[in-house]
Image: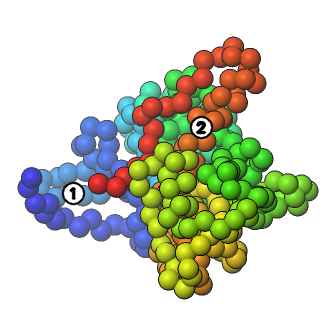
């Protein structure tokens, strides 16, 4: 493999450049930034030069741009809460549509492979899917399944294009009884005395984020590790052992996924979660708390097998339910 070599630095924007996107056929590229403009660059041997500057489409920073698969359109997402669509039917690019609906900064925009759908996502925690018909853009779906701002949701557009409905109960399944955290707590079911939410719901204290588990009797940290491996089906987990304790576990604070913010400040002998920041792990071990990390999605994925059976019963076995065999955590121990 050859060595990458800097050929040219392109200067044209005022302020930060947020995004660069190649035309589908590679003949030109577009860039955008905090100066609220889109610059289209073309090669004029041996240099790349400014071909067009698109202005007046947005009133604030342009965060991301995307060429349509045909290369005839550019969609731009802006901090002004809108998405603009530009076409070059007249021989030069002009803004022919401004998509409104998001309540806050639009962070990302993406076309489906066919160019018939456009997906936008925002700091307002929503994903909007727009259907394209003869240069008319109509909202086909609004997806609200996140608790923080959304930056990338290209998979949603591809699913809808192939007539696949997407339902993501993510956060609610973290908090309900019989959900993801209760499944993870079931690793200790043979020695479990009680389990309660770490952050109870204001209207129902029986549900909420995380689980504080009290065991019937103390177990060793080594036994706790084996129980977690058996529950999750993992060959390996990561262990941060506190040397301020004797290694015996009577209380376990659990939060599937990235549980650092939920577990923070919770008094327990052991934290069990998918991932935590390095310095947060150091901090809690210095407080006498042991930590087991499984990787983010590995602390959740095993629940799918349980839920598939539950859903099958609820639907009276009238629908074929399959759990993906290809889905896996992107991180693995090698």
Which residue sits at x=69%, y=42%?
169
Residue 114 position, x and y percent, is: 44, 27
Is 131 or 315 nearer to us in this picture? 315
Is 48 or 328 nearer to us in this picture? 328
Which residue sits at x=78%, y=47%?
177
Q: How many marks?
A: 2
**Mark sitting earlier along the chain (1/2):** 1
In the rendered image, the vertical position of residue 163 relative to residue 289, given as above or below: above
Is 191 or 199 nearer to us in this picture? 191
- Quadrant containing the C terminus in the rendered view: bottom left
Residue 136 position, x and y percent, is: 60, 30
Dot 2 corresponds to which residue? 304
In this view, the residue farthest toward the top is 318
Dot 1 corresponds to which residue? 48
10 Å neighbourhood of mark 1: few (<14), some, or many (≥20)? some
Residue 49 position, x and y percent, is: 24, 58
Residue 188 showing in the rendered view = yes
Which residue sits at x=71%, y=45%?
179
CB of mark 1 within 8 Å of CB of mark 2?
A: no
**SS at mark 2?**
helix
How is colour applied across the structure in the image? Answer: rainbow
Which residue sits at x=70%, y=30%?
310
């Amino acid at each position: 493999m050859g060595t990458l070599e800097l050929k040219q630095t392109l200067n044209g924007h005022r302020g930060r450049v947020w995004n660069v996107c190649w035309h589908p056929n590679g003949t030109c590229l577009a860039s955008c930034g905090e100066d609220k403009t889109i610059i289209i660059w073309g090669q004029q041997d041996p240099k790349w030069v400014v071909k067009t500057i698109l202005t007046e489409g947005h009133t604030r920073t342009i965060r991301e741009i995307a060429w349509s698969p045909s290369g005839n359109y550019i969609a731009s997402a802006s901090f002004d809460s809108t998405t603009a669509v530009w076409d070059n039917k007249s021989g030069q690019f002009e803004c022919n549509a401004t998509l409104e609906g998001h309540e806050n900064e639009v962070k990302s925009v993406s076309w489906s492979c066919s160019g018939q759908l456009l997906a936008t996502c925002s700091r307002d925690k929503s994903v909007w899917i727009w259907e394209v018909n003869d240069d008319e853009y109509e909202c086909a779906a609004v997806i609200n399944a996140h608790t923080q701002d959304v930056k990338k949701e290209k998979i949603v557009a591809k699913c809808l294009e192939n007539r696949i409905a997407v339902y993501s109960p993510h956060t609610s399944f973290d908090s309900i009884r019989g959900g993801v955290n209760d499944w993870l707590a079931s690793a200790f079911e043979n020695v479990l005395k009680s389990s309660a939410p770490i952050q109870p719901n204001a209207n129902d204290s029986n549900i909420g984020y995380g689980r504080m588990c009290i065991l019937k009797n103390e177990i060793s940290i080594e036994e706790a590790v084996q129980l977690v491996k058996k529950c999750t089906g993992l060959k390996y987990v990561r262990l941060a052992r506190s040397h301020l304790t004797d290694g015996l576990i009577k209380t376990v604070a659990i939060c599937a996924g990235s549980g650092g913010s939920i577990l923070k400040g919770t008094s327990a002998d052991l934290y069990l979660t998918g991932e935590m920041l390095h310095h947060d792990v150091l901090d809690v071990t210095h407080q006498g708390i042991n930590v087991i990390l499984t990787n983010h999605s590995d602390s959740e994925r095993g629940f799918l097998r349980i839920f598939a059976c539950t859903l099958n019963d609820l639907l009276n076995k009238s629908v074929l339910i399959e759990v993906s065999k290809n889905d896996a955590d992107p991180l693995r121990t090698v």
